[in-house]
Image: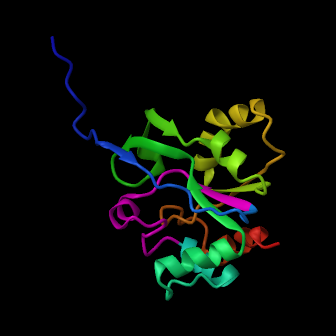
Amino acid sequence: MKKKKPKNRSKPETGFPPIANANSRLLILGSMPGVMSLQRQQYYAQPRNAFWPIMGELFGATTELDYELRLQKLSDAGIALWDVLRSCERVGSLDANIDMQTAQTNDFVGFFSAHRKIDRVFFNGATAARVFERHVSAEIEAAGIGPVKLIRLPSTSPAHAAMRYPEKLRRWSVIVE
């Protein structure tokens, strides 16, 4: 008897390379780019996501700026962007739909070895923090990388509607030195 494939099976998605430079001092990690971000090849491309409005208020990386200029504002502030997952299968954009059996994490040993000034990691939501803790923390500790302070922040996703924008902004303001 043949096994049937699940109806809502998706094809594997692959995330983006990190946005980082030699002066990066902190890293913001999401879980995996959503459908719109993957289509546009831009971090946090969903217009209702609060990430860029928050970065606009904190670092001048406003949504009125071209994407490349927003990335430059973050780089100038010492901020690197990436995601915990390199690839996974997922139906839609929700973290809850990630098939963790297909999830592959990014190479954080290599990343932190190349970006030694980074001493703080801020997670954009609970899923990014949880996956990093379960699948990456021991690996970077075993490699002797650190100390890296890990801080979970509320998700900027529109799916995290229980927290209003002013509270998200207040909590995210901890990334400003």
Quadrant occupied by the N terminus: top left
In this image, 51 relative to 34: left or right? Answer: right
Q: How many labels does the image show?
A: 0
In the rendered image, the residue lying farthest to the top is: 1
Query: Which residue occupies 56% across, 71% down?
Result: 51
Residue nearer the viewer, 92 or 149: 149
Image position, residue 85 (x, y; %) = 51, 45
Q: Quadrant of residue 160?
A: bottom right
Quadrant of the rendering where the C terminus is positioned: bottom right
Identified at 62% across, 34% down, the residue is: 135
Asked if the magenta segment contains residue 34, the reply would be yes
Give left or right: position of 115 versus 71: right
Q: Where is residue 116 in the image (x, y as percent from the top left)?
A: 77, 52
Task: Say above or below: 29 vs 66.
Answer: above
What's the coloring here? Answer: rainbow
Please provide the residue range marked out in magenta: 26-49
Residue 23 drawn at (x, y percent): 73, 66
Residue 124 screen position, x and y as percent: 61, 58
Q: Which residue lies furthest to the bottom in this view?
A: 64
Q: Does residue 111 sit above or below 68 in this rendering? A: above
Q: In this view, does 57 lie above or below 17?
A: below
Q: Is residue 30 magenta?
A: yes
Q: Which residue is painted at 25% across and 32% down in the image?
A: 6
Residue at x 48% of width, y 61% of height: 159
Foreground residue among 177 and 46:
177
Tell me if residue 137 comes above or below residue 59 in the rendering: above
